[in-house]
Image (cartoon, rainbow, N blue to C red):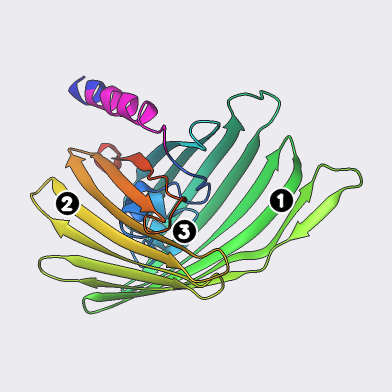
Amino acid sequence: MKKIVILSFILLIGVFSFSYTLNEFNEPSTFSRAIGGAIYPLYEGAQCITYNPAGMANGKDEAFFSHTEHFLGVIRNEFLSMTFKVKRFSFGASIQYTYPTDEELYNQYKLTFGGAYKFQNYSLGAELNAWNGSDIREGHSLDIGTILKFNNVNFSLTAKNLFASITWNSSPLEVERYSPEFVMGAAYFGSKFTASSYLNLSSKEFGIGTIFPVTDFLQALAGYKMTLSKSFSKELSFGMRISYYDFILDLSYVFKDAFKYGDSISPFYISLTYDFTKGV
């Protein structure tokens, strides 16, 4: 009963705390936002869906939830993912629902199904994404990722948006194809901190992040992200991770383009993870 009350309270915080987030449909993880997007070489279970599928292989059965509101609440996004382990295999699925608040007929869905296999210090994962909605007839893509652990360092390589295309509901029908993206990552696990980084070779985006344990239930997070393409942008982020029993609450505050005059909205993110391994 105590856990149910705590969960309900945390969910209420999440629902009422997303008034100033930006258009980040492909980044549902608050933890990732807090560490500059450098989640790719980490084993974060259900949070790794839509990032690096190999990260699902953390050996836990998890449920992850996030709710965000974009453009000051005009567009809302719900994300729910789950992972479960069967021996050395981990399987995951997620649903992402995007809808505006002022137009009931408009909606988009993204479904993801995937799995990962972990053998000693190596893991390999793959996931299939499918889109549908009021303006999308059908869409699909494939993501493949790996993580290799060498002593206290993780290396990762992820190929995203393989064979990606979306058929839009237009007259005539319009098929839009997307180029694949290749992301490299590395993480160092020290005795007093963890440092993680990634580089998207296709979009020329990179990020670094640090994780500092403060107590047994609290971690401090910080990150920096930069995009060097034509849409140049910089982000500075801070956050925390609170662990309580089987719950993990992630919070982050992102200074987006904080040094660019006239283009600064600093979003606040919250997401929740529940580890139900012990109850299985």
Q: Nearer the viewer, residue 74 or 28?
A: 74
Residue in view at x 47 percent, y 60 percent? 53
Q: What residue type is labelled 2?
A: Gln
Q: Position of residue 111 (x, y in %)?
A: 59, 44
Q: Which amino acid does label 1 sit on?
A: Gly
**Label of residue 139 in the image:** 1
Q: Where is residue 179 in the image (x, y as percent from the top left)?
A: 67, 68
Q: What residue type is labelled 3?
A: Tyr
Q: Position of residue 144 (x, y in %)?
A: 54, 67
Q: Nearer the viewer, mark 3 or mark 2?
A: 2
Alpha carbon of mark 3 to alpha carbon of mark 2: how far? 22 Å
Where is the N terminus found, in terms of image quarters?
top left
Quadrant of residue 247 in the image? Answer: top left
Q: Please, what secondary structure does the residue beneath circle 2 have?
A: strand
The residue that disc 2 covers is 219
Q: Eyeballing the image, is 185 above or below 61? A: below
The residue that disc 3 covers is 51
Marks 3 and 2: CB-CB under 8 Å?
no
- Residue 272 among magenta residues: no
Where is the C terminus found, in terms of image quarters?
top left
Q: Give the range drawn in magenta.
A: 6-20
Residue in view at x 39 percent, y 70 percent? 198
The disc, 1 or 2, on the residue closer to the chain's N-terminal end is 1
The disc, 1 or 3, on the residue closer to the chain's N-terminal end is 3
Residue 273 vs residue 213: left or right? right
Alpha carbon of mark 1 to alpha carbon of mark 3: how far? 18 Å
Q: Please, what secondary structure does the residue beneath circle 3 have?
A: loop
Quadrant of residue 15 in the image? Answer: top left
Give the class, few, some or many, for how many residues have Cα within 10 Å of label 2's Cα (few <14, many ≥20): some
Q: Eyeballing the image, is 151 above or below 47? A: below
